[in-house]
Image (cartoon, grey):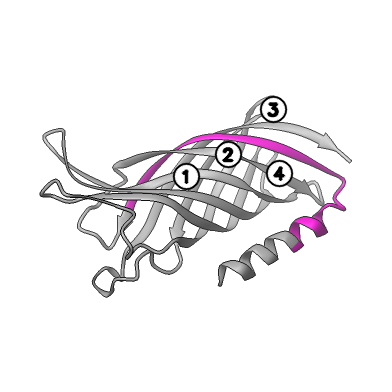
Amino acid sequence: MKPFLFLTLLLVLTLTSLKAQNFSGNVILGINGAQVDGDTQSGYKKAGLKLGFDVSLFDEKKVSYETGLNFSSKGAIDKVNGFTQFKTSLNYIEIPLLLNIRLLEKFSFIAGASYNYLISSKITEYDGTETKDPDYLKNYDINAVTGIKTDIWSGFELRAIFNYTLGHITSDPDMKYWRNNVLNLSIVKKFGLKK
């Protein structure tokens, strides 16, 4: 899906959902465990931050829609004896479009997609060479998103999210299988508001 179409869909859904009975603003603080599928590394070894805010719009007791704006650090890393040998650092601004379905009183299933705009990147090769913002990295990435969330105490929830690139993140034919693969654990502070 082209970025323009995704953002248009996001805007239409958000404006349509404003008829909901209530909504909440949420502040997100989390940590990513990331890897890049298709490179020579494996394992969720690259730690990164996820920071941002979103808005949840409730149409019914069991269903809500969510969109927002997040900073998310992704990539891959290879360490030998505690020393970094290879590292891919990818920093994105994410715009998620999510559906939340309450399964139990305190647990919800999350599914949707996110548009990710690459704001900075750096690749450190095995020989120590660093390349900032290489031109073979695409400046956007669209991810499938799934996960669960649970209320942990009044006004707070815990989210466990899995993100995976639907296409690929490079334009280089030799790196055509590179995809972001991210596990995220976040604490969310909810600020409930009513219409």
Q: Which residue is mark 2?
A: 52
Marks 4 & 2, CB-CB < 8 Å contact: no
Calculate the distance from the C-alpha at mark 2 to the C-alpha at mark 3: 17 Å
Marks 2 & 3, CB-CB < 8 Å contact: no
Does 36 sit above or below residue 28? below
Marks 1 & 4, CB-CB < 8 Å contact: no
Q: Which residues are magenta?
A: 12-35
Q: Which residue is mark 1?
A: 72
Where does the C terminus fall, quadrant-wise? top right
Q: Nearer the viewer, residue 71 or 36?
A: 71
Q: Which residue is mark 4?
A: 55
Foreground tag (4 vs 2): 2
Within 10 angstroms of label 3, few (less than 14), some, or many (20 or more) residues? few
Q: Is residue 10 magenta?
A: no
Q: Residue furthest bottom?
A: 173
Calculate the distance from the C-alpha at mark 2 to the C-alpha at mark 1: 9 Å
Marks 2 & 1, CB-CB < 8 Å contact: yes
What mark, if any, has residue 155 been given in the picture?
3
Foreground tag (3 vs 1): 1
Where does the N terminus fall, quadrant-wise? bottom right
Q: Sequence order check: which comes first, mark 2 or mark 1?
A: 2
